[in-house]
Amino acid sequence: MVATPIGNLDDFSPRAVKTLKQVNLIAAEDTRHSKPLLRHFGISTPLIAMHEHNEREAMQNILARLKENQSIALISDAGTPLISDPGFPLVRECHQLGIRVCPIPGASAAICAISAAGLPSDRFLFEGFLPRTQAARRERLQGLKHEHCTLVFYESNHRIRESLQDMQLVFGADRPALLARELTKLHETLISAPLDELLQQVEADPMQRKGEIVLLVAGAEKKADAEQTAEATRILEILLKELPVKQAAALTAQITGEKKNQLYQEALALRDPPKS
Ligand code: SAM
């Protein structure tokens, strides 16, 4: 698994170049896309294509060659293979067959953006690409509303406006965020601002809707524990007046982000208080 640059060719590691020269074959997501890069670094190893449309067939071919003790490198168009890119079934199969898989690390847009975002980086959730349709996108975002860790999205420049609008709607206008565009390239831009300001800037300046984009959103703020628990109990009490214990606990968990099991126990106690 060999990482290639996400823009700046100086990020191609000597180890990656050496590996690509030494292997018998390079499986590339798009051979036409990778050829100029490989030529630039004097890599003349034969190429085969493995992309999302031929992944299963290509995988069988690759596995057959690996079983004959050939060494094969997998690269994607840019960055680290398998990160929103093809390769997962192949790697899983290699592990099942006892074929050694060796990562040659390098650039990945998500990690690159996190390192410069100024948002908490101790815990983050990589979400990759959001669904294309508005209803599915909003549903996905709704499910992330109470996540406390930093959220990392890959976004197409065609949909950046719509995604920011939906994020503002679901997460709130003042949620801190970062738009990282064209990382490691000539027009690299990092804009750190709350979601509403980010949306305004993207709407006002068409440049901000060009190129490749990673979007980071801060996690939901943690309320003080006592405050949060009191709020959950209040909601649970209201719901218990209308709903069975299990449903009330599940809904309260969804609304507050508190643990369902804990709320279920609390709901049981509220419904049938212990006799003194
Ligand atoms: N495997 C790649 C990686 O490790 O980052 C990601 C592949 S994914 C198909 C492509 C997406 O990654 C782009 O749509 C964009 O969201 C993000 N991306 C890739 N290169 C980027 C760059 N130079 N600047 C910002 N985002 C980038």
Image: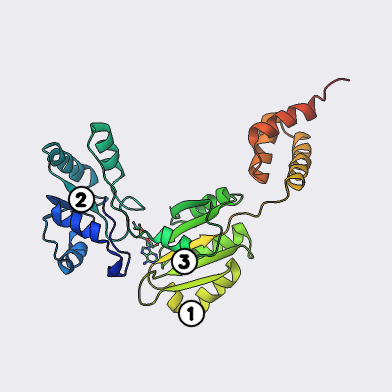
Residue 8, picture quadrant: bottom left
Bin the neighbour count of mark 1 within 10 Å (Cα to Cα): few under 14, some 14-19, many 20 and up. Answer: few
Indicate which disc, 1 or 3, sits on the residue closer to the N terminus. Answer: 3
- The amino acid type found where label 2 is placed reads Ala
Q: Residue at x 64, y 44 (%)?
A: 257
Tell me, for residue 160, which label it has, or none.
Answer: 3
Q: Is residue 150 above or below residue 249?
A: below
In-image side of 175 versus 76 (left or right): right
Nearest to the observer: residue 45 or residue 261 = 45
Residue 205 numbered tag: 1
The mark closer to the camera, 2 or 3, is: 2
- CB of mark 2 near ligand 1 (< 8 Å): no
Indicate the quadrant containing the C terminus: top left, top right, bottom left or bottom right.
Answer: top right
Give above or below for 209 relative to 141.
below
Residue 6 position in % (x across, y down): 33, 64
SS state under label 3: helix
Secondary element at tag 1: loop
Q: Circle 2 sits on which residue?
A: 73
Q: CA distance from mark 2 to mark 3?
A: 33 Å
